[in-house]
Image (tube, rainbow, N blue to C red):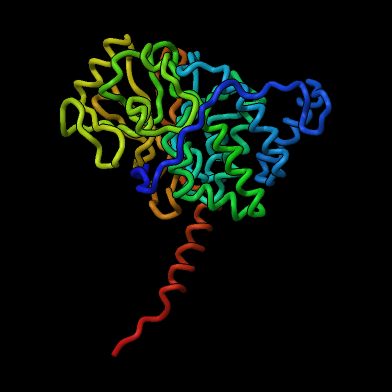
Amino acid sequence: MEAQADEDKQPAPALGKPSTSSKSEDGTAPSSASEKKNIEKFLDSAFKGSRLSLREIKWICSKATKIFYEEPNIIDIPTPVTVVGDIHGQFHDLLQVFSKGGAAPKTRYVFLGDYVDRGHDSVEVMTLLLCLKVKYPSEVTLLRGNHECREISSHYGFFAECQSKFEEKEGLELYEAFSNVFDYLPLGALLGKKIFAVHAGLSPGIVSLDQIRVMERFGEVGQQNPSLQDLMWSDPTENHKGFFRSDRGNGHLFGEDVVDRFLKENKLSRLVRSHQLCKEGYQETFGGKVLTVWSAPNYCYRMENKASVLIIGESCQYKFSTFEASKENLNKASEIMRKEAEDEGPSSFA
């Protein structure tokens, strides 16, 4: 959601295939039975919000990264499928997503990115989602959002959260482990061969899906690849035709004519995205040709918005299922308001 930070960007790492060593961290050869037992144990703990150890999280990150590396830039996903928008570290609201949409793998999920920052439980959100990815790699798809990069997540809460929940050195290791996973996340999904799902929007440098399919995506997202950056920053607008630079500082605004050309060129019916707060939890733009799904209710514990998941049927029919903030979210909001009131102190009058 945020404009890009002004601080100097960290250089994008040169990435290749993740390590595929046959040895585990303690030097023993991993077995499929022991790995299955591990992930089931970790997943059970993650659903409870229990914090795993650094070693356990790094193991999950390693397994997930290898899966992401093998996935294409655009993943073909059969329907039916449930699409989830921004989560932003709101763990208990993420649990509501599964209550609303059903449990994986019975329900197939596509998450559109922005898992971290702003909310207070990004570590728990990422741990749960990566456990689900490792357990159900074909039924849980995680795309990259604009917050899944070091430049943004180091300034909007995730880095500080890692440091606060672990000892300083471990916190840095944890942050780097998650950030290394982000470097491999795919860019988009093709749902039922008719709907293109992406975190944010379109780019003046992209006409066809094939251009996205051949992009070099591994590494930090930055201005050295503006078209890729547009996928994670751009927004639709009903006020203009064509493309205009966004006041976010990154990405573009794009009009209905742009959407029409892109859908026609790629034989698509609509674009599905997140990236923008929606008061009612969702928004339909250009007569339903662009659907925005937002899954963080009471965003930042103060916006009082609803949230939704987007349920796409077998024939690509769709409906939004909305939900309100969890009781934990509302309790946290009350704590924040109380603390802010205490910090202000009593008013003084002359």
Q: Is residue 281 left or right of residue 88?
A: left
Residue drawn at x 48%, y 36% is 148
Residue drawn at x 63%, y 54% is 168
Q: Is residue 23 left or right of residue 331?
A: right
**Residue 84 appears in the rendering:** no
Residue 284, image quadrant: top left
User: Relative to 289, is 126 above or below?
Assistant: below
Compare residues 187 and 51 and report the one nearer the observer: 187
**Residue 204 appears in the rendering:** yes
Compare residues 166 and 320 and report the one nearer the observer: 166
Residue 286, position as x, y percentages in the image: 24, 26
Residue 333, position as x, y percentages in the image: 48, 58
Residue 130, image quadrant: top right
Q: Quadrant of the N terminus?
A: top left
Q: How many numbered discs sit on the rendered protein?
A: 0
Q: Quadrant of the C terminus?
A: bottom left
Residue 323, position as x, y percentages in the image: 46, 40
Residue 278, image quadrant: top left
Q: Is residue 24 left or right of residue 231?
A: right
Q: Is residue 201 left or right of residue 336?
A: left
Residue lying farthest to the bottom in this orientation? 350
User: Relative to 60, is 249 above or below?
Assistant: below
Residue drawn at x 45%, y 17% is 74
Residue 33, position as x, y percentages in the image: 81, 22
Residue lying farthest to the right in this orientation? 28
Residue drawn at x 16%, y 31% is 240
